[in-house]
Amino acid sequence: MSEGKMKFREMATFAAGDLFGGGAQLVIAFFYLRFLTDVVRINPVLAGTVILISKVWDAVSDPMMGSISDGTRTRFGRRRPYMLAGFFLIIVAFVTLWSAPDFSGQAAKFAFVAFSYLFFSTVSTIVAVPYTAFSSEISVDVKERGRVNGARLFFSQTSSLLGAVLPMVIVSLFPEKTGYRMMGLLFGIFYAIPYLGIFLWCRERTPVPEERTRFSLKEAVSPISVRSYRSLIGMYLLAFFVMDVVSAIFTYYMTYLIGREDLLELVLGTMLITQIVALAPAVLLAERISKAKTYMIGAAIFIVGALALGFYRESWPVAYVFVIAAVVGLGLIACIVMPWVMFPDVTDVSVLAFGERRSGAFAGFMTFLRKFSSAIGIWVVGLMLQFSGYVLPGDAIVPQNAAVWVNRADETVIDLGKDGVPDIFVSRDLGTVRFANGTDMAARRGDGVLELLPPGETRPSIVIEAGRKITGAYDFPDTSTMKSVKTLSQPRSFIMGLRVIVFALPAVLLLLAIAIASRFPLTPKLHARLLELYKARDGAETARTAEDRAREYPETSGKDDALAREEAELKAALV
């Protein structure tokens, strides 16, 4: 155990560890399902099932990692060795996650995706569980600990902003599959570097039990027996489930409902910049009115923003999307920050409940729930895509200087000169082709593919796939005069599904979360009483001599009775 106040370098280094926790989850939430359906070309239900299956493994690995971390004894401490391992593993895992295989069969693709996601999930467990436990042991001072975790969330939100804006920019610089791998490499390095600093410069400051803990299923699930913890994970699970669902669906929302995929990064950036700006006020508000009440205010604001998303009309100005994104970001920050700010406080209750601090077990179960909510959210979106009639986008191969879009008549429109004047209109089923502005080409069809050939030519200059006919993604060298674009069009049933999932689900779940938060047992007053009890019971309040205590407490048994009564009252309220 290392005593003393934290220095700025240590605080900043430890907080930077949440670049991975905040950024990686957001990149996956916003872009991974779309990567699986549109780049790997895997069935949406299979894509969601891959992530769901990985949570079966997490149900074992996360609690086990909590116990392993609690039982670790090295000269570097209990948590730091796993930070060093994370430095190397994160890079490998994140690159693998964004590698699209060249397999043609769905079964082979499913197997590869399942392996890559299970590997990433395992690495995330090895790093995130000890890091989360470390957050409650980095300081014994409650205010200092709160500042550290507030700083963590600043780094998390900054990483989220970068994760929303930069991935597709990086991908666009390379052929599609190469671009995703390069994005995985660059972000993997970015996420990994802080963990080397944590290993070198950060210290654990809470007492370490002499006896090593061994993995026990009973101990792994013991946090759920604590009332304060159950309330916390209720708030946490509902908020993050809503966030994951909205995140997974948002790229589809901007592409198919708003019709402005080109604005996706800017809208996400607006949402996340609002969160960063609102972070400090949210933490200050929590100190003033309580963390649970701040959470409730944020959830209410989120509901207002979600309703606006659901009722958005195409006739509204595009600027309204940015305003709505800012409202959602303002509400979201409290919903995702408060549970983590409350977590170290709840681990204080573990001493009351079990006679020892079980930060690792509490962190392991909470990390599992985070992954579980993400998996369920993406799986729900995959089901919605499948059963609302989602059509996997086809490919159109066109000249480099051409523009392609889908009009309100559900036709693929090609503007050969990018002059804003359409030259070719193709129906969804490829059965009808209309030419404008004197354009004339021969049409050749076969097996769901339309080829358009200039007069006298035998080689097509334009190739369009039907939406339901999917082949491998096309990569072209820089010298190619052709390019591949995706034809984006969806049935009305899918558009209606988008509207429902972005407002009905958040409204219902967050109203339930508000109800749970309103009854959160660990109030600021009770937490203060709990800490005073520990000080009095352990003799940590002052360094009195035995004679001083005898003079102040002539009847020791009376003091012991008072402490026993206080402990019983706190257990009844919090445990």
Image (spheres, rainbow, N blue to C red):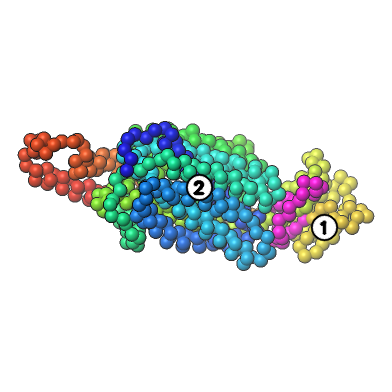
Q: Secondary structure at mark 1?
A: strand
Q: Is residue 467 magenta?
A: yes
Q: Is residue 234 left or right of residue 177?
A: left
Q: Write the residue at 41% across / 47% down.
A: 80
In the picture of the structure, the residue carrying the numbered disc 2 is 87
Residue appearing at x 71%, y 60% in the figure: 471
Give the quadrant of the N terminus: top left
Q: Secondary structure at mark 2?
A: helix
Q: Is residue 216 above or below residue 304?
A: below
Looking at the rendered structure, the kind of residue marked 2 is Phe
Specify the farthest residue to the right: 456
Q: What is the magenta range? A: 464-489
Answer with the quarter of the image where residue 12 lies: top left
Q: Relative to residue 66, is residue 548 depicted above or below?
A: above
The span from disc 2 to disc 1 (Cα, nearest Å) is: 49 Å
Tell me residue 537's x, y (percent).
Answer: 19, 44
